Amino acid sequence: MKRIIKIGLLATILVACNSSDKSKKEEVGSKKETTIETTTEKEYSSYEEIDSDEALVATALMAVPKESRANCKVIGYNMAGDFVTFREGDNQYIVLVDDPKKDGFNAACYHKDLEPFMARGRALRAEGKSASEVFDIREEEVKSGQLNIPTGTTLHIYYGKKTLYNPETSEVADAKLRYVVYMPWATSESTGLPEVPIAANHPWIMNPGTHRAHIMISPINE
């Protein structure tokens, strides 16, 4: 009888200890999740939604080298959904603001000599052409000389998943830059570049052998 009582007491003690350990682990996990959430909220506490034309322009300019931001042309869709020229410019860059109707953030700047090529793409997409149709049409037009993509012209893309920005610095939360250097008809053989990135932040050639061949330089994923 005494043996049975001892076994019962031991089982009760073990159950109590396990419950206590589980509660402590759950408490620690809860504190950790709360800390992460609080840190994230604190990190973006000074950020605001990109919800005005002024904010669209300010954030898009982050795609441009700092010394060239003051004099570049800025175009794109405004908050009302109209494609407009926000301001004229006189340097080598044209800036395309983020489309506020699309998820995430994606602004860009490109050399002004690329504008005919970019404008043609916008026009074809407005007609309802698919991505493959746009590619094929512009391929033929570049081959025929109707369109021109100057070798070495660049595209800078400032992008991210969030649409929050710091109104003091114009930086977009978690946004990064990637770069494109157009090299029409270039191949891996003609440039010595791989067709896929072989290391983080390593240049590679995309769409080789076509009108849209370009050197791609993507950011390191942290």
Image (spheres, rainbow, N blue to C red):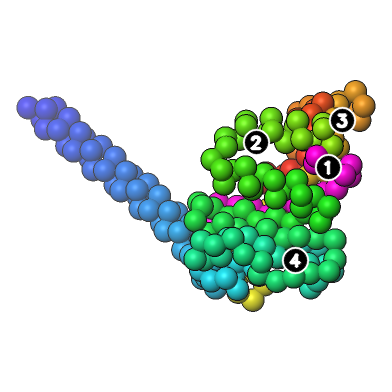
Check disc 3 and give the amino acid type. Ala
What is the spatial separation of the Cα atoms under label 4 and label 3, in whole angstroms?
29 Å
Give the residue number, with chain letter if any, for mark 3: 186
Q: Is residue 65 above or below residue 45?
A: above
**Dot 2, crowdedness within 10 Å: few (<14), some or many (≥20)?**
some
Binning the other alpha carbons within 10 Å of mark 1 as few (below 14), some (14 to 19) or many (20 upward) gives: some
Residue located beneath label 1 in the image: 148
Amino acid carrying mark 4 in the image = Lys
Can the viewer see residue 168 in this picture?
Answer: yes
- The secondary structure type at the circle numbered 3 is loop
Nearer to me, 169 or 120: 120
Q: Which residues are magenta?
A: 146-164
Q: Which residue is denoted by mark 4 in the rendering?
A: 73
- The magenta stretch spans residue 157: yes
Please name the residue that numbered disc 2 is placed on.
134
Distance of label 3 from label 1 (alpha carbons): 15 Å
Image quadrant holding the N terminus, namely top left
| Mark 1 vs 4, N-terminal side | 4
x and y percentages locating residue 105 in the rendered image: 58, 55
Q: Position of residue 63 (x, y in %)?
A: 73, 59
Q: Secondary structure at mark 4?
A: strand
Q: Residue at x 57, y 70 (%)?
A: 53
